[in-house]
Image: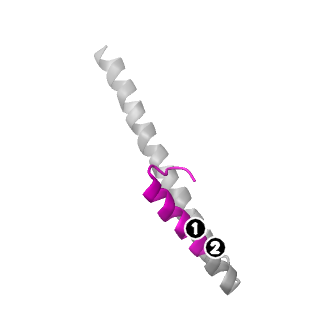
Amino acid sequence: MHGLVDDAGRYNKQNKYYQALSLSDKTCDSTPFVLFMLKVLLSSIKEVQSSSSEQASDQVKRLLHG
């Protein structure tokens, strides 16, 4: 899973993954798992957007200020 920085965060995300998967299995409803995955994807997209914006800003500053 993208965006996991430390072991504690990785364990927490992994635990939530298995909880969502288990709940979906027990209820025969994929919604909990799909919602979990959508949240992970949204978080990853926001992270990439943020780093891309920062990188672009640095490039613009270098171009403007030589």
Residue that mark 2 sits on: 21
> Going by the picture, which residue comes out furthest to the top?
66
**Residue sitting at x 53%, y 68%:** 15
Query: In the image, is 59 to the left or to the right of 35?
Result: left
Query: In the image, is 52 to the left or to the right of 18?
Result: left
Span highlighted in magenta in the image:
1-20
Query: In the image, is 61 to the left or to the right of 24?
Result: left
Three-letter amino acid code of the residue under disc 1: Tyr
- Can you tell which quarter of the image residue 24 is in? bottom right
Q: Are marks 1 and 2 in contact (CB under 8 Å)?
A: yes
- Can you tell which quarter of the image residue 22 is in? bottom right
Q: Position of residue 18 (x, y in %)?
A: 60, 70
Report helix, strand or loop for mark 1: helix
Residue that mark 1 sits on: 17
**Residue sitting at x 48%, y 44%:** 48
Report helix, strand or loop for mark 2: helix
Q: Position of residue 3 (x, y in %)?
A: 50, 50
Q: Position of residue 13 (x, y in %)?
A: 51, 62
